[in-house]
Amino acid sequence: MTTPGERSTLSFLPRWSIVWAMMRKDLAAYTRDRFYVLVTILALVVYVVLYWVLPSTVNESIEVGVHHSDLDSAFEQVTSSGTEGIEFTEFASEEELLSAIGANGEDGSLAIAISFPPDFVTQIAGGKDTTVKLYVDQDVPDEVRRAISGFVREFSLAIAGDTLPVTLPSEEKIILGVDRAGEQVSLREKLRPMIAFLVLMMETLALGSLVAVELHSRTLGALLVTPLRVLDFLTAKALFGTLLALSQAVFILLLVNGFASGAAPIFVALVLGALLVTGFGLISGSTGRDFLGMMLFGLLFMIPLAVPAVAVLFPGSTSLWVKIIPSYGLVEIIFRASSYQAGWRELMPFMAMLLGWCLAIFGVGLYILTRRVRTL
Amino acid sequence: MTDPAIRVDGLSFSYGDLLAVDNVSFEVAPGEILGFLGPNGAGKSTTIKVLTGQLTQTSGEATVLGMEVVSQRDEVQGRIGVSFEEKNLYENMSAKENLSFFASLFGIKGFDPNPLLKAVGLDGRGDERVSGFSKGMQQRLMVARSLVNDPEVLFLDEPTDGLDPVSSNAIRALITEQAERGVAVILTTHDMLEADKLSDRVAFINEGAIVALDTPEALKMKYGSRTVRLRFTEGDGVREEVVSLEEGNAGDALKAAVSNGDLATIHTEEATLEQIFIEITGRGLES
């Protein structure tokens, strides 16, 4: 029994003929909104082009400039035996080296340079201290700087005829998981989760707009004096939003080779992701007082939700708190399944996390819209 | 005796502490047009919302076509038509699409919108988007929309608002036609002349309560005073006299006027519904 002032919603199953009629109407409204059609087409084109323009491989070598005057044979001997991933370019003078790294205020072609003193070999061989200058561009990450410093120390030990006080196993490296050496994840692949996320969120705004228009143009009032019930309305909006977001996300992932591996978990993640963003769409559509308010609400959700996808693009920025963002599970599943061929077992924690958020946000969205409809 | 199409008994509704509808009772017979008159905030819209299943009353009973609105909302809403005062059409759809969409909500198969569009004077405009319609055209489409399910009870809120006289007359004719085929109509309007012309009975609502309910003629007889306005030529000007027919010497006054060679015109006058409303409630309809 409803309380006074509320609409009665006594039935618990939607009537599919009415839901279908509502969805057809919403599809017509969506396709006739030139703004959304234009934005959708543009986004699809731009994202796909961007994906295919980005490099598909990763340049794993670091180019290092070197100047030395008395260690030709020693340098060649050391560098030829264990400097995988570093390409050395030798310079005849320190001035040329400094010019190449841009130390003279010009744009340099190198980011890292090493300058050995003229008496390097003599000093090292005599067991005396000496100084090697290491030049690094301000943008060079700290871990790379430390690696180059380590190389210089190791190089010095080799010149002095010493060995590292460390015993490495015969295979030198123990690889955990699949050895991705030589086939690291390219920027293109890292962009894939971001593309899927952006397409899903774009449809959040579209659904939010459809809901907001229904509320503010008072057409909902006209609907609710027909046999349509609140449940039919909610079902139609939720289904339409989910299918709209899902279809576009699947379409764009097909275009960016997103289903080449792990197609099943990725598809399930997209279904859950579509439900998740539909929840956000229902919230923004119900709470915004007008179209602008709805857009602002949508953007309010969009920015923090984009953080996990950004974290994939720039792994250094990943923090623990990123893992509690609702979109984290979605992004990780797409990334790990498509780029690392992760299986169901490995993806299950992310799937569970995504499902939990999906149920929570979708539930909140339905609740807010229901309240809004009942108090019209 | 025919069962009433609408029966309201002791209906009350409160928005929190605010009593919007206060123990209202009335009936509307099939084929009858009941004018619902009252100023803004008087409780008209709230009563209509309860009768159309949009709100659940605080107390009292409301039945439409013999069905209790609260417990048989779906059945009731399948057999009523509602036209709102505010324009709430899908503006990016055509007139035909608007009507067809609402027909689909009623489960009507093979719906043809053309006869309805013709009935409201929109034939030939059915394929145009509603966003390009004038306010009057949208109003006519709203009335047409309320008829897609061939309703047995019609709730019309200001159906001729913003219409030109020709369109207004067309809509009034349509309402009368619906009543003649047995549809019960509740007509909410600020236009007292319209209520007077169309309504079989009118209900005056003030502060949530029905303060008068009768035929327009009976209300005029009960509350109004019948007068005759006489105009005499006087030099280059005109002199007016008003004779009340309620007074005992009215006959003598009229005889004297007729025998006066300067009598130019003679008009009988009766109280308007608005005057009667003011007399009963002490306030105007626009307040």
Image (spheres, rainbow, N blue to C red):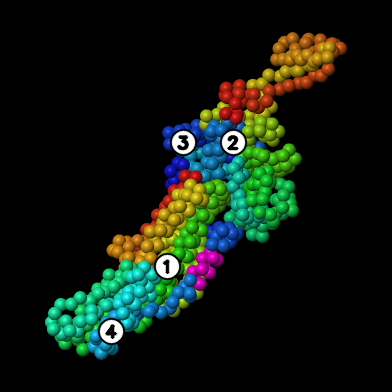
User: Is disc 4 on the same chain as disc 2?
Assistant: no
For disc 4, the marked residue is A83
Q: In the rendered structure, which amino acid carries the disc numbered 3?
A: Ser
Disc 1 + disc 2, Cβ < 8 Å? no
**Residue on which the image places disc 2:** B27
Tell me which segment is drawn in magenta.
Answer: A40-49
Q: Which of pointers 3 and 2 indicates the residue nearer the eye?
A: 3
Residue type indicated by callout 2: Glu
Front-most of residues A76 and A328:
A76
Residue B14 — which label? 3
Q: Upstream in the sequence, badge 3 or badge 2?
A: 3
Residue of label 1: A194
Residue type marked 1: Met
Mark 1 neighbour density, 10 Å: few (under 14) some (14–19) many (20 or more): many
- Does residue B150 appear to the left or right of A5 in the view shown? right
Element at label 2: strand
Task: Please name whichever residue, A278 or B272, is drawn nearer the observer in this view of the structure.
Answer: A278
Q: State if disc 3 and disc 4 touch (CB < 8 Å).
A: no
Image coordinates for residue A168, horizontal then vertical, percent: 19, 85
- The x and y percentages for residue B85 are 60, 41
Chain on which label 4 sits? A
- When asked about the image quadrant of residue A76, the answer is bottom left
Cα–Cα span, label 4 and label 1: 35 Å
- Determine crowd level at label 4: few under 14, some 14-19, many 20+ residues with C-alpha closer than 10 A: few
